[in-house]
Amino acid sequence: MARLPAPRGLVAFISDFGLDDPYVGIVRGVVERLYHGSVRVVDVSHGVRPFSVLDGAYTLYTSYRWFPRGTVFLVVVDPGVGSERRAVAVATRNYYFVGPDNGVLHPAAEEDGIVEVRLLNNPAFHLRPVSHSFHGRDIFAPAAAALAAGVPLEALGDPLEPGSLKRLTLRQPCPGEGEPVEALVVHVDRFGNLALGLEGACLEKLCRDGAVEVETPRGETFEARCLPVFSHAKPGELVLYMNSLGFPELAVNLGSAEERLGATLGGRVRLRPRGG
C-alpha cells in the first residue's frame, strides 16, 4: 500500500453553514478544545449553497490542490445528516478528506488518488452524546483534528472499499465537432458567473468561430463571445472563458450571467458553436 501523507497540523474547513449562525465557530471551538492550539483551522468557504453537494464538491475540488501536502480537509455539506449515509475519512496520495459519503469528497479524492478509506465508527473519536443533526461538531471535527494531530487513520474506524464511495462527476466529455452540449452549472459565484461542468478542451471546440450560442432554461437564445477574460468585453456583454479554477464559465462583464440567463446551480444551459 502507498505511504500515507504526513499530517501538518492543518485542517481546511468547507461548509454550507454560512456565518450568521454559531455553527462554524462551534466546530472551530471543538478543534481548539481537543488539541489546545496544536491544530490550525483555515476557513476555505462557508458560502456553499445550502444542501448543495454539487457546490460543495466544486468548492473542494477547485481548492484542495493549493494547500500543502498533509492538509486535512473537513467538508460539512450534509443534507443527509441523521440518515443512513456514512461518515468517512479518505486518505489520498497527498491529503486527507473527512466528511459525509454523499459524493462531496469524491471528485477531489479520486483525482488525487485514493489510498485508503475508513468509516468513522470508533466512538473514542466522537463527542458524546452524538447529536442527530450536528455530525460536523460531534463526528467530523474530532476525526479531522485527530488526523491533523497525527492520529493514525486506522484508529478512526473500520476499513471501507474505495470503490464503495458515492461518486459524483463534475465534468462531462466534450461534444463532437460542431455538436451542441447540455452543460451543467456546477457553481454560481457571488458575481453571478456560471461555472460549467465541462472538460477544458470543450472551450476550443465550442469557440471555433469566436462565439457560442447559449440557449437558456427559459428557451431564450443569447450569443456569448469567447474571450480570455470577461474584462475584455464591453460592460453588459456575455462572454465564455476559462475561469481561474480550470472550468469553462459564462459571465457578464460588470453584470450577472445568472440573472441574464435565468440559470441556476444544478441546472443546464445548451451551448453550440455560432452558426452550428
Image: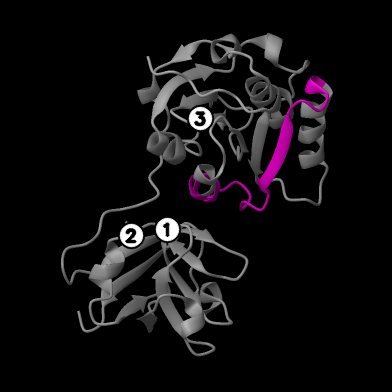
Q: Earlier in the sequence, mark 1 or mark 3?
A: 3
**The quarter of the displayed image where residue 222 is located:** bottom left
Between the residue at mark 1 and the residue at mark 3, the CA separation in whole angstroms equals 25 Å
Tell me where the magenta segment starts and ends, as one range. 34-62
Judging by the rendered image, the residue that carries numbered circle 1 is 246
Q: For this rendering, which residue is in front, 102 or 187?
A: 187
Q: Callout 2: 10 Å neighbours few (<14), some, many (20+)? A: some
Q: Residue at x 83, y 42 (%)?
A: 22
**The quarter of the displayed image where residue 154 is located:** top right
- Residue 152, position as x, y percentages in the image: 58, 13
Amino acid marked by disc 1? Gly
* Res 101 label: 3
- The nearer-to-camera label among 2 and 3 is 2
Q: Residue at x 73, y 33 (%)?
A: 40
Amino acid marked by disc 2? Gly
Q: For this rendering, which residue is in front, 255 or 69?
A: 69
- Residue 14, position as x, y percentages in the image: 63, 43
Q: Is residue 121 left or right of residue 249?
A: right
Judging by the rendered image, the residue that carries numbered circle 2 is 200
Q: Callout 3: 10 Å neighbours few (<14), some, many (20+)? A: many
The answer to the question of whether label 2 and label 3 lie on touching residues, with beta carbons closer than 8 A, is no
Q: Residue at x 42, y 40 (%)?
A: 107
Between the residue at mark 1 and the residue at mark 2, the CA separation in whole angstroms equals 7 Å
- Residue 271, position as x, y percentages in the image: 31, 71
Q: How many marks?
A: 3
* Above or below: residue 156 compared with residue 49: above
Which secondary structure lies at badge 1?
loop
Which secondary structure lies at badge 2?
loop
Between the residue at mark 2 and the residue at mark 3, the CA separation in whole angstroms equals 27 Å
Residue 118 visible in the current orientation: yes
